[in-house]
Image (tube, rainbow, N blue to C red):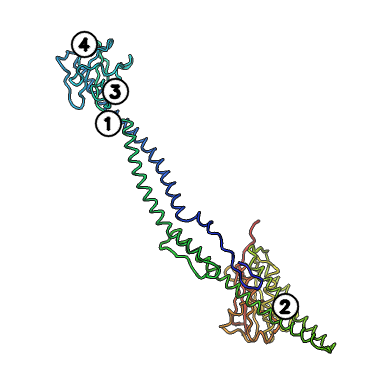
Amino acid sequence: MTLSDNGSVAEPQERPRSGWRHLRPRSIRARVTVWAVAVLAVVVGVLAMVAFNLVRENMLQQGGERAGMAALSVAEEIMERRYEGYIPVSEPIVRLQVVEQRTHEVLATSAALEGQPALTPLEPEEDDPRMETTVCGETAGAPPDDCFRVVGYSVPNSAYGDVVVFAATALPGFLDREVLVLALTGMALILLTGMGMIIWYGVGRALRPVGSISDEMERISVTDLHRRVPVPKGDDEITHLARTANASLARLEESVARQRRFVSDASHELRNPISGMLVKLEMELSDPDPDPGGRERLLNGLLADTERLQNIVSDLLELARMESDVSRDGERVELTGLVREEFGGRRLRHELNIHDAEPVEVVVDRLRLTRLLTNLVANAERHAQSRIDIVIGHDHGFAVIEVHDDGAGIPVKDRERVFERFARLPESRKRDPEGSGLGLAISREVAHAYGGTLVAGQSDLLGGAVFTLCLPVRTPTAG
């Protein structure tokens, strides 16, 4: 936001909306959903693999235990006798074999394995009589896709001689890798689709206020800063964002209003002396027989008007510097010493008394604080009848300076107005016609810049006006 050549507030160029589009809630919603589903897919994949391995190992272990118990039972029986016919079985173990250890000839079998070769060509190791493996297909007398857990025990010196007893238990069909992968893939797709829809809806619902906020922000320009973004219900981050945006808009609206008012007041205050100077010059130039004495008076008047213009411009520049100076650097200043140094030996039209207690230090810019105090004393001198008192004190972490006068005082309704720019009460115009009306405004800006306050009131000490300056007592920041 800038000032145009004619002194009005120029609207900034509209920012291209393409910069906003990549931050639209819909784009954020899509990205959040995609990333969430991708992360969820990885997690589901890992969990599915772990679950598959755990379930498979558990089922194999249980099948091996059942088959092992059945094989041991058969091994105990053939130590004493041979079977007449088929080996008797009981659910769930229905496949049993007694196989000659060297030739792998089937010596005895259960009915389910009649006519089938040995379940497996594997044999137990010499140092371990037990072996365990998995077989699938027709070897076990079953369809090709069926699998069995086979446990074998080496039995020497049995009724059949040196043999191996095999027992097989059927494994659940879902333990087949392809079937399980397809099943897990289908379940994962269903889960991810459902979770994606939930995330899409949830994120969209959460970001819906952001869309309203961004749309409203796009509509706001310098001409309608009174508009505000909608504040959603609740107390979450988006609600805080909306409140922060509204607070920023309020400050911006106030700043623009102050700038416009300032430009208007400055134009009015500068127009009067300039118009007066033009009228005097035109009258002098139009006089066919100018008077040398009148010309000298004209030059003196122009000099006074020029000095007033210079004072107004200087005050305007000071206000501009105060608003743009965000650093607020300062130094340690002892207030009692500063006041006595600046005003103790100054010759004024009225009596000046300085009251101080213990030394009080603040961190401010010394020149700006001096100008602030000079403005307050000059204001008191214009309105005092005979006496001005400066009181320096300390109150709850604040350094306090009060400037009292015994003048007529300030009406209650005007005690805030005197700090407005170019605001001058009738008595001020009467006592100081050439004043700019910016001294107290600058003084308050200085006080606010360093975290303090400046207010006007009624003096209990002298009966006139009192200006009270409060500045926080603190030490300079390191570095």
Q: Which residue is mark 2?
A: 309
> At 64% across and 61% down in the image, what residue appears?
476
- Above or below, 291 relative to 159: below
**Residue 90 visible in the shown view:** yes
Q: Residues within 10 Å of mark 3 (few under 14, many from 20)?
A: some
- Above or below, 225 relative to 72: below
Alpha-carbon span between mark 1 and mark 4: 35 Å
Q: For the residues labelled 1 and 3, say whether their Cβ atoms are less than 8 Å apart.
A: no
Q: Of the residues shown, which amino acid type is indicated by label 1?
A: Gly
Residue 403: give x, y in percent of width and height.
65, 78
Of the image marks 1 and 4, the number of the one nearer the N terminus: 4
Q: Which residue is mark 3?
A: 135
Q: Secondary structure at mark 4?
A: loop
Mark 1 or 4: in front is: 1
Q: Of the residues shown, which amino acid type is indicated by label 2?
A: Leu
Q: Which residue is mark 1?
A: 173
Alpha-carbon span between mark 2 and mark 1: 100 Å
Mark 4 or 3: in front is: 3
Residue 57: give x, y in percent of width and height.
32, 30
Q: Secondary structure at mark 1?
A: helix
Q: Of the residues shown, which amino acid type is indicated by label 3?
A: Val
Residue lying farthest right?
292
- Above or below, 426 relative to 225: below
Q: Residues within 10 Å of mark 1 (few under 14, many from 20)?
A: few
Of the image marks 2 and 1, the number of the one nearer the N terminus: 1
Q: Secondary structure at mark 3?
A: strand
Q: Of the residues shown, which amino acid type is indicated by label 4?
A: Tyr
